[in-house]
Amino acid sequence: MKKNASLKLNAIITAFVTLCLFFSSLPASAEDDSVYITILLTDPQKDITAGGVEVSMYKLADFTDYMKREFTPAEEFEPIISQLDFSTSEKGFTMENAEAVLSFIQENNIPAASVLVSDENGIADFGEVEKGIYLIDASGSEKYMIRPFLVEAPLYEDGQYYNKVKASPKFLTVNDDSSEPDSTPDSSVSDSSKPDDSSNPPDQGEKIPQTGQLKWPVPVLAIAGITLIVIGYADRCFRKRNED
């Protein structure tokens, strides 16, 4: 009798601990974490700092689940988004797509969601933004040729999500005698627009928790505490039953 009761107790404890471990391995929610976008109009290799340049940001879509790359296009951009493939960063974040979106904007006179002028350090800080896909355009500069590019927030790169996104487009001075710039922008937004050595990577200290990544030791301590409570309660019931 006592042996069977002991086996039942061990089974209960094992099952409970297994459930705790299962739930601790689930993705950590990052829906409450804010995201930010900062544009850096600088090129250390060419010693260029483009201050006083108007930078426009257009919101193309809202992420409904950025880990699954599920999004809802903004109503005004739905016609062009439906023609492009944004299923992955590699397919969606190309110079061709960025220029197609910009042409659509110009043809339909769509206003920017936000417009800033870069400061003396070439920085245009848009601050906190909603999770989504954006087009950045600074092509109105007379001194620099700056090509549009796409950016997502949060940014997925090297197996991590970053909520502070810093991106630098590739640009050349108008009087530059070099050939046409590469079709891939210099931006820290995706593998299809991989930054070169001079680009600014995302803040390494601003990662968003993702699958299997929890802010321990809080969950570990909580699970351990609950486990001890359950063990204590089960042991008490077991002893009381034996006494009866």
Image: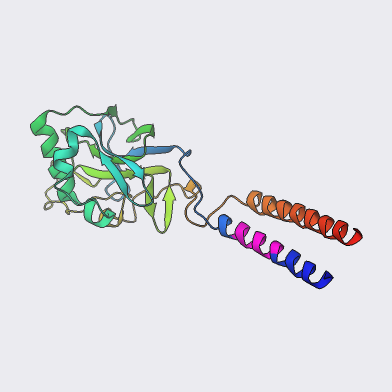
Residue 228 in picture, x, y percent from top left: 76, 55
Residue at figure coordinates x 76%, y 52% from the top left: 229
How many tags in the picture?
A: 0
Q: Main secondary structure of the magenta part?
A: helix
Q: Which residues are magenta?
A: 12-21
Frontmost residue, 223 versus 142: 223
Is residue 144 shown to the viewer in this render? no
- Give the quadrant of residue 23: bottom right
Q: Residue 49 occupies which quadrant of the picture?
A: top left
Considering every residue shown, the one lying at the far right of the view is 243
Q: How is colour applied across the structure in the image?
A: rainbow
Q: Is residue 189 above or below residue 57?
A: below
Relative to 184, does residue 64 appear above or below in the rendering? above
Q: Is residue 23 visible?
A: yes
Along the horizontal axis of the image, is 140 left or right of 124? left
Find out whether residue 162 is within the magenta segment: no
Q: Name the image quarter holding the N terminus.
A: bottom right
Q: Residue at x 28, y 54 (%)?
A: 89
Q: x, y percentage for residue 104?
A: 11, 37
Kindly give the residue lying farthest to the bottom in the view shown.
3
Residue 231, located in which quarter of the rendered image? Answer: bottom right
The C terminus - image quarter: bottom right
Picture coordinates of residue 194 (x, y %)?
Answer: 29, 55
Q: Residue at x 70, y 62 (%)?
A: 12
Q: Is residue 13 magenta?
A: yes
Q: x, y (%) of residue 121?
A: 35, 35
